[in-house]
Amino acid sequence: MAVDAGAFEAGPRTRRARLGLSGFLWRRPWLKALSLLALPVAAFLFVYIGALAALMVSSFWTSNSFTAEIEHTWSLANYRVIFSSSQPYLHIAARTIGIAAAVTLTDAILAFPLAFFMARLAKRRTRAILFVMVLLPLWSSYLVRIYAWQTILAHDGAINWFLNKLGLPDQNIAYTNWAMWIVFSYVWLPFMILPVYAALERIPDSYLEASADLGARGVKTFRSVILPLALPGLVAGSIFTFALTLGDYITPLLVGGPSSQFIGNAVYSFVGEGNIPFAAALAAIPLAIMGVYLVIARRLGAFEAL
Amino acid sequence: MRRIRKRHALGVVALAAIAAAFAVAAATVHASAAGSNLPTKIGKGEGSLNLIEWTAYSDKSFANKFEKQTGCKIHRKDAGSSGEMFALMHANGGGGGGQYDLVSASGDASLRLIYARDVQPINIKLIPSWNQFLPIFKSPAHNTVGGVHYGVSVQWGPNTLIYNTKKVKPAPTNWNPIYSAKYKGHVTVPNNPIQIADAALYLMKKKPSLGIKDPYELTSSQLTAAVNLLKGQKPLLKRYWNYAPDEISSFKNGDVWIGAGWPYQTLLLKASKAPIKEIVPKPTTGWADTWMLASKAPHPNCAYMWMKYVTTPQVEAKQALVFGETPVNPKACPYMNKIEKGSCAGYHLNEPAAYYKTIKFWKTPIPQCGWKKSSSCMDFNSWELAWKQIQG
């Protein structure tokens, strides 16, 4: 009782102060926004944008060839080397982009039917089981899964064993670009399934009923209703599969062949040599590609499906 | 519209300001010069020793005793490649970043570490076993510049030709099979620019007209010839191997039949009962490793104690047999035989001086040609760029 009375007595003063503060902030909406956003914005600017800016800046420097000392003179030398046709870097970039695109397409084709089944046909229990199965690989290390594929694709691995059982000859898939395509498609598949599932799940049943009422058959409904509404999901998924493949360097190292270098591998070896400026310039390539990709994705409404 | 543009401009200014701040921060970081006053005796241990090493270079089987004797607790950072070692030493302002004391650098990284001032001169007199070393490892060109020692040699080994005895017939006698189409699609070589030297060594005999005198000192035209040979080799390859376990697994599962490697891989493959043999072709390339003292080593006394310890005959013998390499101290011979009968001869520690002439040890290519008395040779940077062109 006594405590309650005390609180009641102190009430008007604190209440007045609180009202004063809220009125003060109400009159200055910018201050309210600032106090709310100061911390995340500072982190964003310094940790995220700052790192990118430092990367971009150092890409215009050069590295002393022998001592690996960075020379702080501005030049476009690194970019000139990257874009010169006598150098291998454009070739490496083309290979990286090509495989990233192939992986994205493969994952879209594989993910769509599964996501459709999960979102629209499966019962709750089946859906839960499928979800666990899709997510299960993500619980184990990415490296372990790549090594697993190494043994599956190897000369004496599961694939050749299976082919031999069928009376077919051995295939040399290990250490080729085909191996990379298979492994990338496998590791990034869940990242395609989930956004496509989310997009498909959001299509109201009434749309499909309306389509049927208007006389559209299954194929027509699929083409004119489901696919356009699922497209943002597909594009959102493709951002993941494309970007993740574009930036990878471990899979090429472990399952790639003699001509499987990715941009990431070139970056890695230049960093290893202490030539940070050239590595930074190379790293700008995927950054630019993803920039363009995101603009297109936004046009297609991908960010509404995330 | 106006407002938006103004905000935009503000963002650009902010970004530019941040960029400038980072630029200034990065520009003020400079590698410090190496100290020149050599210690005359080893002081009291600092209680800690931080190593950048090849895996098992401070194996517990001999390092535990050291820790007990000296009280220097070892902290290990295993590196996967020479490039990684150099990067680790050069990071955080260089010289080991004030974090690392010693690095077990191979010949393809040691001169770079010296010229980048990441390592400092040492007083070789504080390492008594040095007097027992094979003469060629006392002051080799890859760790001694102008009579100044930047570390102490520790172990070495030849680059060997490893092959699958069931698939490769007849048994090879030289490096030719990895350049010929007979085993197309089943060859492997290391992913390392220093591999260019192996091509140059092959060309020394194959094309004397190129006038290659030293596989690590190549003129522009000689480098081009070696690069062309390696570009022609590429279609024969199954893969380039990056880390020793990669090569081991490729041999084990039958994807690779023949390739360049080290005795270490052969040792492990034989242990797993794979049908694998190796030869040491003559001539061949080889590596020699040096424990080098970081220029900002925080525990120099423990570092000296370690260099002193690992070069003693008993420890040399132990390390050699753990890793599958050869000591630089021939006094290790009886100790090797005691651990494993015949291993001293098996690792060629009892060979005459002529044997070592057939091994061209790794050294970082620099512009100064020893044989030409001029600065017209291609430096390591050119080798790295050439290697990237081959890999493409």
Image (cartoon, coloured by chain):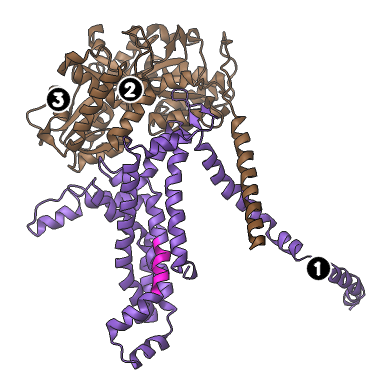
Towards the viewer: B10 or B195: B10
Q: Position of residue A175 (x, y in %)?
A: 24, 45
Co-location on one chain, circles 3 and 2: yes
Q: Position of residue B53 (x, y in %)?
A: 43, 28
Badge 1 density bin: few <14, some 14–19, many ≥20, Cα 10 Å:
few
Three-letter amino acid code at the position of disc 3 = Asn
Of circles 3 and 1, which is in front? 1
Specify whether residue B23 is painted magenta.
Answer: no
Q: Looking at the figure, which quarter contains the N terminus of chain A?
A: bottom right
The purple chain is: A
Specify whether residue A231 is painted magenta.
Answer: yes
Badge 2 density bin: few <14, some 14–19, many ≥20, Cα 10 Å:
many
Which residue is labeled 1 in the image?
A27
Can see residue A271?
no
Which residue is labeled 3 in the image?
B176
Q: Which mark is residue A49?
A: none
Of circles 3 and 2, which is in front? 3
Q: Chain of mark 1?
A: A
Towards the viewer: B113 or B314: B113
Q: Position of residue B36 (x, y in %)?
A: 57, 11
Marks 3 and 2, how far apart in space? 29 Å
Q: Which mark is residue B320?
A: 2
Three-letter amino acid code at the position of disc 2 = Ala
What is the magenta range? A230-238
Three-letter amino acid code at the position of disc 1 = Arg
